[in-house]
Amino acid sequence: MVNAVANAPRPIRRIIIVGNGLVAAGAAVTLATTLKASSCELLWVRPAALEQDDSHGVEVTDPAFGCWLTMVGYPEPELLRTCRGIYSLGVQYNINQTPFFWPYGTHGIEPSPAPFEQEFFRRFDGADQLAFADHFLAAQAAKLGRFDFPVDDPRSAKSTLGYGLHLDRSALVEALAQYARTLGVECVSCDTLNVHGGSANGVEALDVGGGSPLAADFYIDATGASAHLLRQTLNEPYDNSQAEPWRYCLSYSEMSTVTPQPFAQMLCEPWGWRRQCALQDNLKVDCWVRDETALHTLTSGMHTDGYRVQGIQSGRSRQGWAHNCLALGQAAGQPGGVAFSEWSWASRCLMLWLELLPDRTGRPLLRDEYNRRWRQLYELVNEIHWMHAVGFECDNKSLPDQLRWRLSVFCGFGRLWRREEDILSDEAWIVLALGLGWYPKGYDLTLVDADLDRLQHKHNKIHQTLVKAAETMPTLTEVLKNLKAR
C-alpha cells in the first residue's frame, strides 16, 4: 500500500502558455478542452511586444483542422463567418503551364487486386501517369468551381470528399482567444516578459511586471522563432545546418473581383513558389523566395508596399520537450511552410504530447519517447517542403537521405511503405510526387498480364461517374451564400 501511494501519479495542476499568435491560441483551446476533466488551471500570457508571424496572413487548413474543431467544440460555420473564410477541396498546381490538382479527399477505389494507382503505372509512362490525379471527385468538382460536404455513405462518390478551409489568420487568432476565455482560460496581456530558469532546473517562473512572478507545473513555449523559453532560457541547442531552398517568405493581400474557387493555387515562378488563397472578400498571397536578389526583383515590380517579409531559418531544436517546457511551432523548429502551416505542424506535436501526457515529475521516459517521435514528425513535414524544391532549387543529391531513398523506391517500383508518423495518405503523397515530376518505372506484379483495354474502359467509366457527380454539386458561391444566410 505504501508503494502504491508513493508511485501514484502527480497530475499537472497548472500550465502557462506563452505566445501571441495562432499556435498559442490553438494550444490554449486544445488544452482547455482535453484537460477539462483533470481540473488543470490554464494561464495564457500574451506579451504585447512579441510580434509573431503566425498572427498574419491566411491559414490554409487540411481536413485535420475540421477534426480538431469538432474535438474542441467550435462550430465550423461560425468560424468561417468570423474569419471571412471559404471551403477548399485541395490545391491547384501550375508548373511550366502543366496543371495538376492535389486533393484533400480520397479516390475510394478498392484494390483489385493491386492498388488503384498501380493501374496507371501499368497503363502509362512518364507524365501521362498523372491521369491518376483526375480520378478524385475533389479534382472534378474543383474544375467546375463546385463544393459539397462528405457523406457517410460508402455507396456515394461524395463519401470520398475531404475539405479544408481558408481563414483570415488574425481573425482566427482573436476568435480562438475569445473561445479560450469561455472555456476558462485566464488570459494575461503584458508589456514585458522575463523568464526565470535555466538548463539545470527548467523554467521556474515568469515575470510579466506589476506583480508577483507567475509559476506553473508546466510551460508551453509558443513564442515563435525567438523561442523565449526553450532556447533563450533553457539554452536548448538549435541545429540549422541544413540548407533552406527559400530564404524568404513574402506575404500580401490584394482585392479580387474574381469569384472564389474551392482551392488554393500554387504557381511555380522563376524565383520560387507563389500561393494564392481566396477569402470571401480578398486574395491572400504568399511567396517563397529563393534569395535576396530574387526578393529585390519581386518587390521592385510590386504595385503595393503593404507586404510583409519573413526570413526563413530552417532547422530544429535538439529537443522539442525539455524539462518542464514544451515548445510548439517555430519555437521548436521550422520544417518549412510550403505545404503545411505552422499551426498544422504545432497541433500534431501538441496532440502527440497529450497522448503521452506526463505528470509533475516529468516522466523522462515519456519525454524521450516524445522527442523521438517529434523528430520523425519534423522530418516528414520537412520532406514535403523539400519535394517542392527538386528540379527548381536543387537536385536529388541535396535532398534529406530518407526522402531520397523513398523517392528512389517509388520511381523504381511504384511502391510506398507507411511510416509511424506519416501525415499524408499514400494516394495524396503519390499525386504530389507525380505532379512534381517523379514517375515510377515499375508496377505491381499482379498487373503484368493485365488487359490494357479493360483498364482503360474501367478508368473511363470511373471518370464519367465522377464528372456526373461533380455536376450535381452546388457551386462554392451557393454554399457560401447559404452560410451567410444562417
Image (tube, helix red, strand yellow):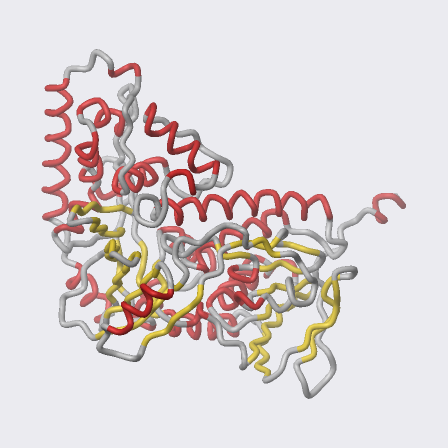
Q: Does 471 sit left or right of 196 as displayed?
A: left
Residue 450, compared with residue 20, is above or below; it is above
**Quadrant of the rendered image containing residue 291:** bottom left
Quarter where residue 233 is shown: bottom right
- Frontmost residue, 436 versus 297: 297
> Quadrant location of residue 451?
top left
Position of residue 221 measured from the top left corner of the image (x, y, whole percent) = 60, 64
Nearest to the observer: residue 308 or residue 55: 308
Q: Residue furthest front?
A: 293
Quadrant position of the N terminus in the picture: top right
Residue 153 visible in image: no
| Name of the residue lying farthest toward the top | 449
The answer to whether residue 414 shows anywhere in this view is yes
The answer to whether 405 appears left or right of 371 in the picture is left
Which image quadrant: the C terminus? Answer: bottom left
- x and y percent of residue 337 in the render? 40, 56
Using the image, determine if residue 440 lies above or below residue 105.
above
Which residue appears at 27% of the width and 36% of the height? 154
Q: Residue furthest right?
A: 2
Q: Is residue 348 above or below residue 250?
A: above
User: Residue, x 78% and y 61% (percent of image)?
Assistant: 201
**Of residues 423 and 11, the one drawn nearer to the viewer in this rendering:** 423
Can you give x and y, in whole percent of width and height, for residue 210 in the image?
A: 68, 88
**Residue under the image location 59 percent in, 70 percent down:** 18
